[in-house]
Image (tube, helix red, strand yellow):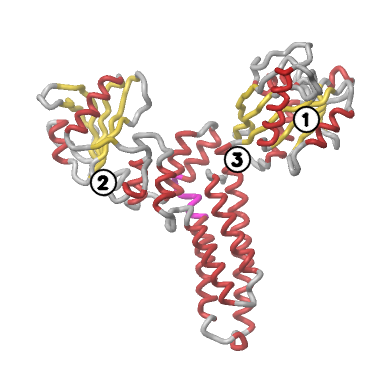
């Protein structure tokens, strides 16, 4: 873990920057304050800046470890803001380990996870939201998520943060200027301007929180649990959504005993779908364990999909399941087997009518799922957001709510604005404690 003790280090770090295993090309990355001696001993001479050159990579006895491309980026025009050397050689594990071992022998140490990006942040090459965008791009599970991560890397999220922060700073300045005057000396024009700026600030922050919520969906997706009585068609529905036979389907009630998990993409949003054991009274000890796990999965779900056998309609047992759902649990009712029930597919006030067997109504279900999880668009203009970003934005919003209740007491109003500003700037790292930085960067991959 990259903790607070490491943020002041200025030593040289090295790591293999490509994934483990065999590949055509492998990369070893080195960063430090002055790499000229290391580069010369390793490559024979220091390459021209930012120019890929073919070099032999030498061991301590002058022998050749490998031959490949060397790229040298002198500070400050590099990813980390320090001197950076990238060695692109053959992607065999033994070759790369030998190359890394040679870098360590020349004075480097093994980089911790995320330490290259952490140094880029500490050296002002990117802010914290941009650095997290790098990790999110690597981890992106869909094309939409990758595009949104790129927008974060390029600073779109940070720009929106600073836009709101500027409005907050301007309001703080106006408020602070009134604190030296008695309440009766503050004219009506100043009051109106303060109220107008406060309303505009609230509107901007609300829009930012909405966009961040969409970005969080793209990054983390939503957990959807398929629940219902045995033989309602949950497994068939999972197979239809996944586009492959991931769950066993039979006419025997209770075939599914344990949760089956499958991830799909819904308009670019990752949906993590769990097919669960049918809910019913049972004396079978194995089936009872599966039913208990179903309820545990529902407790954690972002959305519960109650699958109902459309040939029977909603029964007393289905209503009992609905009544037992956790308070506040979002639920979507799906009436399966519409082909057998003689009902047209599509959505109505009761839920979605479909046939998992034929696929009729599946597009209606997809649209209903997107609406139920809160997805509002195609991802354009949305930036990647993490749980900590949402928490910070909600803290800022809570501070503004408290400030709104204290407008008649300017000292308290100003204090809540300050707290909101502090919460907001923690997103970009301008007001972030070192221990949080260590936690964030420790989750990056090594070599990035």
Determine whether 329 is above or below 128 in the image: above
Which structural element holds mark 3?
helix
Q: Which residue is mark 3?
A: 217
Mark drawn on residue 256: none
- Local crowd size for mark 2, using a 10 Å CA cut-off: few (<14), some (14–19), many (≥20): many
Find out whether residue 25 is within the magenta segment.
no
Q: Which residue is mark 1?
A: 306
Q: Which residue is mark 2?
A: 82
| Cα distance between the residues tagged 2 and 3 | 35 Å
| Cα distance between the residues tagged 3 and 1 | 22 Å
**Residue at the location (73% across, 28% down)?**
363
Residue 407, x across and y down, in percent: 63, 74
Residue 1, x across and y down, in percent: 38, 40
| Cα distance between the residues tagged 2 and 1 | 56 Å
**Earlier residue among tags 2 and 1:** 2
Depth check, mark 2 against mark 1: the one in front is 1
**Residue at the location (68% across, 32% down)?**
296
**Earlier residue among tags 2 and 3:** 2
Residue range highlighted in magenta: 153-160
Which structural element holds mark 2?
loop
Name the side, left or right, on which 429 lies relative to 305: left
Q: Quadrant of the C terminus?
A: top left
Name the side, left or right, on which 445 lies relative to 141: left
Residue 401, x across and y down, in percent: 64, 64
Which structural element holds mark 1?
strand
């Amino acid at each position: 873990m990259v903790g607070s003790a490491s943020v002041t280090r200025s030593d040289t770090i090295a790591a293999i920057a490509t994934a483990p295993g065999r590949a055509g090309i492998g990369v070893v990355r080195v960063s430090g304050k002055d790499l000229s001696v290391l580069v010369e001993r390793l490559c024979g001479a220091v390459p021209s800046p930012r120019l890929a050159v073919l070099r032999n990579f030498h061991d301590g006895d002058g022998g050749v470890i490998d031959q490949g491309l060397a790229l040298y980026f002198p500070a400050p025009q590099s990813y980390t803001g320090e001197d950076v050397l990238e060695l692109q050689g053959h992607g065999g594990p033994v070759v790369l380990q030998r190359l890394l071992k040679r870098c360590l022998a020349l004075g480097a140490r093994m980089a911790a996870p995320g330490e290259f990006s952490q140094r880029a942040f500490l050296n002002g090459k990117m802010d914290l939201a941009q650095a997290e965008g790098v990790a999110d791009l690597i981890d992106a599970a869909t094309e939409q998520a990758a595009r949104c991560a790129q927008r974060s890397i390029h600073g779109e999220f940070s720009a929106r943060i600073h836009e709101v922060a500027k409005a907050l700073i301007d309001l703080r300045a106006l408020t602070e200027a009134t604190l030296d005057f008695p309440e009766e000396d503050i004219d009506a024009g100043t009051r109106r301007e303060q109220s107008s700026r406060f309303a505009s600030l609230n509107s901007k922050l609300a829009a930012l929180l909405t966009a961040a919520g969409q970005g969080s969906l793209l990054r983390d997706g939503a957990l959807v649990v398929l629940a219902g009585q045995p033989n309602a068609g949950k497994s068939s529905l999972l197979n239809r959504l996944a586009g492959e036979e991931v769950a066993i389907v039979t006419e025997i009630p209770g075939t599914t005993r344990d949760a089956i998990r499958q991830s799909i993409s819904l308009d670019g949003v990752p949906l993590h779908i769990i097919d669960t054991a049918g809910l019913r009274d049972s004396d079978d000890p194995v089936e009872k364990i599966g039913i208990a796990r179903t309820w545990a999965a529902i407790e954690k779900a972002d959305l519960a999909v109650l699958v109902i056998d459309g040939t029977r309609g909603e029964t007393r047992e289905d209503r009992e399941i609905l009544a037992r759902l956790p308070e506040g649990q979002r639920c979507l009712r799906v009436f399966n087997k519409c082909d057998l029930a003689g009902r047209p597919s599509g959505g109505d006030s009761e839920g979605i009518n479909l046939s998992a067997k034929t696929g009729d109504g599946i597009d209606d279900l997809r649209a209903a799922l997107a609406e139920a999880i809160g997805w509002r668009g195609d991802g354009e203009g949305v930036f990647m957001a993490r749980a900590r970003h949402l928490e910070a934005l909600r803290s800022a919003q809570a501070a503004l709510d408290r400030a709104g209740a204290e407008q008649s007491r300017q000292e308290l109003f100003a204090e809540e604005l300050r707290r909101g500003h502090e919460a907001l700037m923690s997103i970009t790292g301008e007001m972030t404690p070192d221990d949080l930085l260590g936690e964030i960067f420790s989750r990056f991959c090594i070599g990035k």
